[in-house]
Amino acid sequence: MSDPKVPGIQAMQEALADEHAAVYLFGLLGARVSEREQPALFDLLSASFADHRRNRDDLSQMIAAAGDTPVASAVAYDPPGPVDTPSGIRRTAVKLEKRMTLRYGALIANTTMEQRVWAITALREGAMREIAYGVAPQDLPGVKAG
Amino acid sequence: MLLHDPPLTRRTTLLGAAAIGAASLLAACASGSPVGDNEPAELSVDEQAAVKARDAVAQTLAAVSATSTARPGLAVLLNPIAAMHDAHLSILDQGESGAASPDVPVVPPGRAGALAALHTAETQLATLLAGLAAESDSGQWARVLASMSAAIHQRLPDLAPTQGGKP
């Protein structure tokens, strides 16, 4: 259980819960794309999967180091968009990345010190992944839903 | 609570609040600040960060504008970057006047050199904003500064030699 007296712990748990979903869903999306027929999209999805898996592990470690138990993954997650065509998969991937970028913004607002520095890096990397998927740059990524 | 902070800290917090759409808070607190008295104001960490960020963004915007003027062919590439800096300045300038005029930037000769100089300046600005975000007292203010830094990173590929450095 989260201890609300530990600064930022609740925000880190919420970010971890979303990372669990991201890891699952990017794995699902990647499995539905042919590496040979859609190599660019496959590479993007593979990079997202790897980045979110690393973020999940980092958050788990930070939460454990703060004395809390990292929230567990659900058994399965529903994709927030279509998963049956390459264009649909790309749109769903963008939706997932945007959700995570907003989550990192919230994490910055609710943490301090090394946890905030971690979130700042995660926000920058998430914003860059959005660009890689073809999203137009925003003035305030991670603050406003774009 | 935001509404009960001292003016300078409150103002800084409101910058972040305004950026995420808390216009009602901004309207409620926009009146009466002692900033501008002859006595030197005691600046909070966030207030100092706001001034540093504003001056650095203004200086980088001046460099972008000077490059567009010197190299009109780059305007299409640089106009969106200038618009982003304008948007950031509109947040950083809220409730505050008297920003220092930026130095007149020197544009390096050659298209690739001009872009490389801008790439360096933008990278330094993004690093500065991220550092200020890390040190901010206000979490919402930190979020806004970090977001500005990320927005700059999103545009850095446009300044890479392979994008804009063509003769």
Image (spheres, coloured by chain):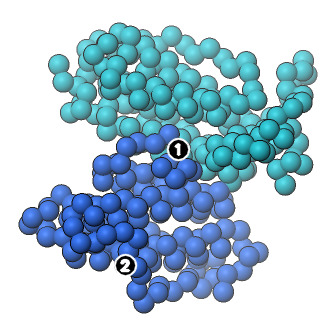
Position of B63 relative to B48 (above/below): above
Q: What's the residue type where badge 1 is placed?
A: Leu
Chain B palette colour: cyan
Res. A67 image quadrant: bottom right
Position of A127 relative to B110 (above/below): below
Q: Position of residue B41 (x, y in %)?
A: 86, 29
Q: Position of residue A120 (x, y in %)?
A: 53, 54
Give the structural element (helix, strand or loop) at label 1.
Answer: loop
Q: Chain of mark 1?
A: A
Q: Which residue, given by chain and number where applicable, does mark 1 sit on?
A: A140
Task: Give the chain letter for blue.
Answer: A
Dot placed on the residue nearer the N-terminal end, 1 or 2 = 2
Q: Position of residue B61 (x, y in %)?
A: 50, 23
Q: How many C-alpha atoms fall within 10 Å of the one at disc 1: few (<14), some, or many (≥20)?
A: many
**Is residue B41 toward the left or the right of residue B111 in the image?**
right
- Say which quadrant the C terminus of chain B sits in: top left
Instruction: Name the residue: 48% across, 58% down.
Output: A101
**In the foreground, B72 or A56:** B72
Q: Which residue, given by chain and number where applicable, does mark 2 sit on?
A: A24
Residue furthest out toward the bottom:
A75
Distance from the alpha carbon under mark 1 to that under mark 2: 27 Å
- Say which quadrant the N terminus of chain B sits in: bottom right
